[in-house]
């Protein structure tokens, strides 16, 4: 210490001299402040550490002089700060393996630390009391990972095991915060665990935790660590000792055990050798409503019945203390209902090869039903009868000879039989005649062989006289010698199951008959890919494809249908996916020879994987051809009749006028009566022409402003002149006009009023109600006539359809008017609906748009507001 004393005698004014003296010292000298930051390091200190002044000054002493760091030095530093007295310490450098003698002296705001090397071993050992020095040699003999840390977490010493794991030198670690070393720096979560544990240990608490570390690339270990504070005589924390045990193998084993017990269909748990219950499988957690964290340790006691807790805990503790298996019965509370159920608790110790207990693996088996049954049995002297009466089957027992001795009440109630009728073989009289011999043979063989049997047969219901199917099972009961002493049997009612099976069989038979028929084609299409995977003979015959084509999966929906109908089929697939079935529609199938076949399609979807659509295909070509011929005839006939009728009309009018000029008024009046039928025939032909044009898409429309209110009044006045039996009433107003074909709209409302008059022969009025909204105008034509049945309302707008009632049939007409009306309204962008009640009349509601940007007739429409 002589050099240190000389240093203190230098006057403040001689700073250059002081630095010269310090630099000339042969010993390494460091001056550090109270935060352990290096303030000064002389040339020998720089040489000893191999660092420049810039690398040393301003850095932590424990990092800058890492190979000088040791626990002994750290203790000496702390002691000097606390006592403010000169201190000496001697130790072996963990990095250089050289002995160091250190003098420490307090200064204003820090310490002066002077290092000397190479003193005699005998002198070194005399400076330490026996048992007071912990050096790195002591730690290297342990397989456990051990290190000495400052309360701030800086590594003072570390043994060889973790260094070998990380394949690093001791000098790379000493003086660094442990959290920033290879083991911990790879995982922020592990770093946080370590820092939190160091903080707890720095308060005097022993901190235990488990974490994942990575000593080097490709090596990940699970550690169970404990950080223990070391106190000096004044109970100040000198340093921290961290010890880590590699529990990787144990963690893997636990993971395997957890995976196994999670797959077990029981309530399963595991416990540590000390009895701490640390894991519960999902079934246990679902039943109790507790999480693993809530139930760990003794937490499971909270779901144990209060009356069972003390007994169960005592049994468990005794099993742990003795290392024996654990078994007891207790009640566990259901987390949702709050009810308690009885469980059989069993646990077996899991040991290693040396017989050391590593784990307890336990199960909880629900025995509540058994406990309840036992309780019922205890309360009854007729144990077997109580059990028999609780099951929903017919129960009986026989002697070893097969003669019936006893039965439950359900058995007697079903057969409506007396005990005399049931004893012995009396039960056989209730068998169905068709199964009698077979059942007796099976029973006799079972008695002979002493083997259980299972058979289905029909038994007569004593209340109804009908037969129901039962599944009968019988088991022998043997004594200790293996001799049969009794037979117990049950009969379970399976009549509904049998009926369901029979209905399914019949349904399958009908489906197969339909599939095998040559009336209708049936194909099965996989939804994914739209591939045809099955087809019956009828479909193959009508399309020309072969079964080989189907087996090769070369036929698709797209390849067997007309390309221009793709949108139609897309809508169909969407409908069947949403509704489960498909509304029948007309389409064309492309046959193998390239020709097209008109068909009617329908279908249903089966949702099981792979999803398939079963499509029903009906050859529609004959009907389509007939319709085409009919349309051609109508078109031809209407054109051929129109010219002669026009000539007839003109000739009739001309003759009538000549007769009037000649004064032959009677003859003129008679001839005038012909004009009505001629006009009717003219109207009929006009309707036929319109139908023909609609079918061909050539019905013409004019675009013009239409004052709908004025139009309705004109139609009403015209119809009023034609029909004197009814009063046509118009109500409401339409202040705005619309764009449309005035002639066609006049045709619409003339037809509706004409129909209303015809189909209300006993009424006196027909009403038309007119109303508007900002977007539409609505006209309701209401009559008080015959009405239309509900099932016919959607059909009356079809071509040539007429109501089928006798009163409606008596009224003339061809069923074209409403078809034409619906088409005209559709082309105007409107809708028509009907609401009707038989015997009270009908209301036809026509809704037309006021504002329209496009025209659905021939050509484009201007703005609809005028």
Image (cartoon, grey):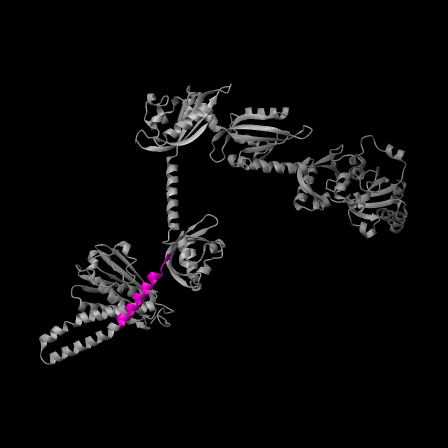
Q: Could you say where residue 276 lies in the image, as x and y percent from the top left?
A: 61, 31
Taking 535 as reference, is 725 left or right?
A: left
Q: Nearer the viewer, residue 506 or 726?
A: 506
Taking 687 as reference, is 576 left or right?
A: right
Taking 257 as reference, is 47 left or right?
A: right
Q: Could you say where residue 841 lies in the image, as x and y percent from the top left?
A: 22, 57
Decide if residue 50 is in sight here: yes
Q: Is residue 638 magenta?
A: yes
Per the rendered image, the range of residues in magenta is 618-639
Q: Is residue 452 above or below residue 588?
A: above
**Is the magenta region chiefly helix, strand or loop?**
helix
Numbered-mark total = 0
Query: Residue 139 appears in which quarter of the rendering?
Result: top right
Q: In this view, does 612 lie above or below 718?
A: above
Q: Could you say where residue 390 lies in the image, as x and y percent from the top left?
A: 41, 27
Quadrant (top left, top right, bottom left, bottom right) of the C terminus? bottom left
Q: Is residue 612 above or below residue 376?
A: below
Please name the residue shown 83% across and 43% down the image: 112
Please name the residue shown 48% across and 30% down the image: 340
Q: In this view, does 495 lie above or below 767?
A: above
Decide if residue 87 is in sight here: no
Quadrant (top left, top right, bottom left, bottom right) of the N terminus? top right
Q: Which of 325 and 146 is in front in this view?
A: 325
Q: Which of 72 and 112 is in front in this view?
A: 72
Q: Could you say where residue 537 lies in the image, as x and y percent from the top left?
A: 41, 53
Q: Is residue 176 magenta?
A: no
Q: Which of 46 and 820 is in front in this view?
A: 820
């Amino acid at each position: 210490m002589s050099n240190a004393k000389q240093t203190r005698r230098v006057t403040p004014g001689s700073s250059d001299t002081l630095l010269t003296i310090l630099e000339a010292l042969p010993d390494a000298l460091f001056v550090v402040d109270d935060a352990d930051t290096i303030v000064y390091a002389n040339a020998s200190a720089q040489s000893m550490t191999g660092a420049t002044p810039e690398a040393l000054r301003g850095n932590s002493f424990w990092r800058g002089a890492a190979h000088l760091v040791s626990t002994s030095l750290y203790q000496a530093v702390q002691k000097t700060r606390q006592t403010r007295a000169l201190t000496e310490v001697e130790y072996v450098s963990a990095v250089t393996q050289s002995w160091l003698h250190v003098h420490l002296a307090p200064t204003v705001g820090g310490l002066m630390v002077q290092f000397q090397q190479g003193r005699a071993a005998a002198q070194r050992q005399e400076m330490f009391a026996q048992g007071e020095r912990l050096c790195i040699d002591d730690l290297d003999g342990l397989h456990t990972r051990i290190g000495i840390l400052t309360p701030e977490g800086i590594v003072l010493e570390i043994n060889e095991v973790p260094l070998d794991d990380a394949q690093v030198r001791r000098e790379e670690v000493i003086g660094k915060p442990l959290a920033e070393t290879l083991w911990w720096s790879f995982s922020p979560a592990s770093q946080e665990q370590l820092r939190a544990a160091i903080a707890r240990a720095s308060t005097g608490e022993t901190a235990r935790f488990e974490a994942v570390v990575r000593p080097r690339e490709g090596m990940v270990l699970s550690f169970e660590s404990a950080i223990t504070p070391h106190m000096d005589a004044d109970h100040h924390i000198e340093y921290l000792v961290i010890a880590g045990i590699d529990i990787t193998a144990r963690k893997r084993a636990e993971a395997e055990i957890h995976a196994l017990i999670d797959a077990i269909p029981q309530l399963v748990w595991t416990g540590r050798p000390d009895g701490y219950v640390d894991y519960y499988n999902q079934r246990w957690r679902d039943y109790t409503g507790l999480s693993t964290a809530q139930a760990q340790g003794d937490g499971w006691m909270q779901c144990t019945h209060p009356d069972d807790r003390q007994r169960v805990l005592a049994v468990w503790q005794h099993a742990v203390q003795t290392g024996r298996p654990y078994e007891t019965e207790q009640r566990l509370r259901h987390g949702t209902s709050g009810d308690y159920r009885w469980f059989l608790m069993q646990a077996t110790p899991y040991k290693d090869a040396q017989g050391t207990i590593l784990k307890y693996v336990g199960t909880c088996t629900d025995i509540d039903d058994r406990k309840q049954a036992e309780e019922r049995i205890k309360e009854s002297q007729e144990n077997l009868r109580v059990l028999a009466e609780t099951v929903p089957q017919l129960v009986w027992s026989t002697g070893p000879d097969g003669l019936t001795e006893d039965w439950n009440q359900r058995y007697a109630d079903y057969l409506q039989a007396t005990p005399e009728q049931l004893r012995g073989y009396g039960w056989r009289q209730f068998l169905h005649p068709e199964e009698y011999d077979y059942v007796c043979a099976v029973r006799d063989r079972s008695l002979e062989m002493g083997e259980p049997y299972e058979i289905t047969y029909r038994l007569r219901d004593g209340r109804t006289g009908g037969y129901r199917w039962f599944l009968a099972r019988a088991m022998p009961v043997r004594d200790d010698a293996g001799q049969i002493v009794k037979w117990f049997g049950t009969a379970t009612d399976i009549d509904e199951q049998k009926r369901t099976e029979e209905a399914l069989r019949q349904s399958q038979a009908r489906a197969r008959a339909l599939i095998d028929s040559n009336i209708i084609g049936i194909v099965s299409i996989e939804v994914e890919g739209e591939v045809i995977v099955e087809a019956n003979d009828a479909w193959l015959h009508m399309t020309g494809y072969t079964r080989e084509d189907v087996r090769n999966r070369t036929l698709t929906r797209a390849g067997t249908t007309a390309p221009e109908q793709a949108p139609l089929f897309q809508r169909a697939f969407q409908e069947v996916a949403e509704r489960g079935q498909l509304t029948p529609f007309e389409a064309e199938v492309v046959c193998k020879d390239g020709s097209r076949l008109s068909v009617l399609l329908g279908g249903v979807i089966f949702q099981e994987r792979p999803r398939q659509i079963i499509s029903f295909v009906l050859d529609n070509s004959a009907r389509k051809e007939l319709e085409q011929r009919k349309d051609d005839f109508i078109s031809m006939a209407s054109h051929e009749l129109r010219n002669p009728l026009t000539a007839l009309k003109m000739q009739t009018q001309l003759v009538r006028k000549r007769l009037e000029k000649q004064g032959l008024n009677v003859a003129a009046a008679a001839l005038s009566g012909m004009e009505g039928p001629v006009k009717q025939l003219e109207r009929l032909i006009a309707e036929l022409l319109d139908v023909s044009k609609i079918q061909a898409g050539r019905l013409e429309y004019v675009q013009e402003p239409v004052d709908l209110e004025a139009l309705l009044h004109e139609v009403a006045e015209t119809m009023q002149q034609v029909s004197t039996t009814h009063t046509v009433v118009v109500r409401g107003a339409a202040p705005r006009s619309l764009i449309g074909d005035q002639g066609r709209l006049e045709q619409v409302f003339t037809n509706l009023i004409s129909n209303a008059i015809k189909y209300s022969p006993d009424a006196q009025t027909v009403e038309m109600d007119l109303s508007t909204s900002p977007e539409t105008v609505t006209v309701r034509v209401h009559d008080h006539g015959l009405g239309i049945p509900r099932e016919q309302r959607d059909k009356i707008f079809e071509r040539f359809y007429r109501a089928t009632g006798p009163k409606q049939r008596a009224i003339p007409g061809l069923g074209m008017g409403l078809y034409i009306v619906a088409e005209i309204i559709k082309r105007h962008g409107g809708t028509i609906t009907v609401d009707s009640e038989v015997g009270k009349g009908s209301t036809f509601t026509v809704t037309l748009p006021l504002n329209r940007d496009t025209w659905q007739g021939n050509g484009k429409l201007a703005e609809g507001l005028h």
